[in-house]
Image (cartoon, rainbow, N blue to C red):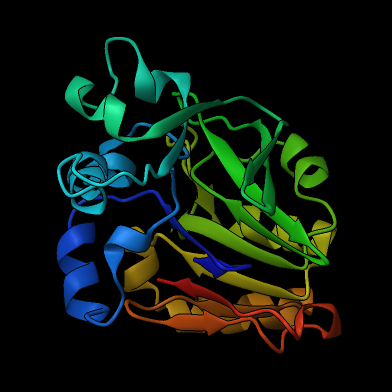
Amino acid sequence: MHIKGKNIMLDPGPGTLVWWVDANPCIDLSKTDAIILSHNHIDHSNDLNVIIDVITKGGWTKRKPMLFAPAECIEGENKVLLNYLRNFIKITVLKACTDYAIGNLKFKTSVEHRHGVETYGIMFDFNCKISFIVDTKYFPGLIKSYGGSDILIINLVMNKGKDKIMHLCVDDVRKILSEIKPKKCIITHFGRTMLKGDTNKIARMLSKETNVDVVAAEDGMILNLDEFSRECRDRQMELDF
């Protein structure tokens, strides 16, 4: 994400570094200002350490990027951050429904998600509100926590829901969009049943049923938000998928 002059990476999972070099050869990874981890599952955190090592050039740069992550990512049995990298970065532990800042860019965490480990979504609010509903099982508290969002990026893993799997399905997202009514929704983080069901077709169906502009993310897609709303017109904002 490039928002208000800040470069932010959310959930660097497996292959992030390789994909970044291949897809963004003109973007200097060392200029990343902050990394945000929503939770410690490997598909969201696998490349964290190598990304930190690249950004800081093995600790030889004076500039220290920020790391925002739940306590479980930093400490304990299932921590994902290597000890020797701690001095290379500035660490902030995330908690539920709390305000944070990356310089002049402010963001807030959501209510704690239901995902089996400590997990938080992220909301940026600067005239237009952009929210990331990351991995979670559906529960009514999501509606209140993400209410007022202009753009929702939603991790939609399953076509049909399964009780024991703590991820959102199409019916859940339909309910979320009908209640929150954002101006735009990007669905992403697809599981096998979503891919088999045709993500673009599902996005069109959700658009028709909820009257929300729903788009299915694709690898390498860039969402330019400059013209999204009148309030945001003078800011350069991009989200890379």
**Outermost residue toward the front in this view:** 62
Position in image of residue 115 (x %, y %)? 48, 31
Work out which residue is located at the far top of the displayed protein and give it.
Answer: 76
Where is residue 54? Give x, y as percent: 19, 52
221 horizontally vs 179: left or right: left
29 lies above or below 176: below
Q: Nearer the viewer, residue 168 or 49?
A: 49
Task: Answer with left or right where residue 5 lies relative to residue 151.
Answer: left
Whether residue 99 sits left or right of residue 192 in the image: it is right
Image location (x, y in percent) of residue 61:
25, 47
Whether residue 5 is situated above or below residue 46 in the rendered picture? below
**Residue closest to the eye, 104 or 165:** 104
Viewer can see residue 194: yes
- Residue 80 is situated, as x and y percent measured from the top left of the image, at 27, 27
- Is residue 134 shown left or right of residue 199? right
Query: What residue lies at 57% left-to-right and 68% top-to-bottom?
Result: 5
Q: Quadrant of residue 131?
A: bottom right
Q: In which quarter of the image is the C terminus?
A: bottom left
- Residue located at (72% from left, 84% from top): 228
Count of numbered circles on the image: 0
